[in-house]
Image (cartoon, helix red, strand yellow):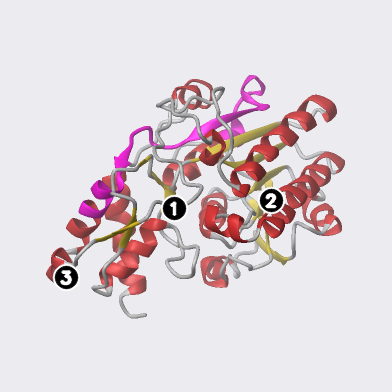
Amino acid sequence: MNINLSGKKIVVTGGAGFIGSNLCEALLDKKNEVICLDNFSTGKVENIKPFLSNSNFTLIEGDIRNLNTCLGVTKNADYVLHQAALGSVPRSINDPITTNDVNVGGFLNMLIASRDNKIKRFVYAASSSTYGDSESLPKVEDKIGKPLSPYAVTKYVNELYADVFSKTYGLETIGLRYFNVFGKKQNPNGAYAAVIPKFVNQLINLESPTINGDGLNSRDFTYIDNIVQINLLSLVANKKSVNTVYNAAYGERNTLNDLMSFLKYYLSEYNPEIKNVEILYGDNRIGDIPHSHASILKANKKLNYNPKFSLKQGLEKSIKWYWKNLKNE
């Protein structure tokens, strides 16, 4: 990835999480100083263990719901990559208060800390859930519907707060609406596991996965390396490209049935029995968007974003990692 970014001090909130730890790795590879803030509610020490001996890496165990913690980690930093959040639509439906406290209250704390410590640019994880009940495809940044879950509400509020801080305080912000990100270090376990690692884990163990709905719901599945690329590009983008939001996706959609076929195909190379695992179907999940497909024209034009990995290419790389890390669990 030929992005000129080195010698900077960069805060990654949620840095021990799936996306955050991949960002930490990329930033360290480019010789930046990385401050990782995580409370380990969903992040894992294993994700950042290889970095702990790196003199350019600092781990601070803390919570974005504490303003003093946020002020401390951003002191003398150049940039913030804000990834810390409580993800998952079902989690937010089960516990909207905690989701709001973390995703809205914590987000506001990080904005205030970034403003007060004169952070040069605040790049944050937004969400495709913001498109809500909008049926238009592909999804274009300035056309959204009403949110379908508490999680979606919190991520939309993030965008509103970022816009206000840009206009009122002059803080440069960029929001990246992530579309179904997957890849190495993504946790397959727990009630709120993302669909790809969960399905992979079940297939490896010859268990029948359950698809919500008839399998025709579609998603713009986005491999983690594409997400790393757009985050780094956001840090170095010119000032004409800031104070807005971008779709962070590959720009194509596949049904859940397509996804399952690909997973079985790639995994069966490791164990032919996986081809014969039965796929089950259940009810549609409350709060889910039926179809998700991003236009990435804006990001391509303004950030020079050019994602390298399709769903198939990303799955092939991810499954190698999962087979190595999950088959002996």
Is residue 321 covered in magenta?
no
Q: Nearer the viewer, mark 3 or mark 2?
A: 2
- Badge number at residue 103: 2
Q: Nearer the viewer, residue 200 or 154?
A: 154
Amino acid type at circle 2 is Asn
The stretch in magenta equals: 234-261
- Tell me which residue sits at (24%, 47%) in the image: 258
- Tell me which residue sits at (46%, 62%) in the image: 193
Residue 47 visible somewhere in the drawing:
yes
Which one is earlier in the sequence, the residue at label 3 or at label 2?
A: 2
Residue beneath disc 1: 285
Q: CA distance from mark 1 to mark 2?
A: 22 Å
Residue beneath disc 3: 271
Amino acid type at circle 1 is Arg
Where does residue 328 sit, x and y in percent of width and height? 32, 80
Amino acid type at circle 3 is Asn
Q: Secondary structure at mark 3?
A: loop
Is residue 315 found left or right of 121 in the rendered image? left
Which one is earlier in the sequence, the residue at label 1 or at label 2?
A: 2
Q: Residue furthest bottom?
A: 328
Residue 8 visible somewhere in the drawing:
no
Q: CA distance from mark 3 to mark 2?
A: 40 Å
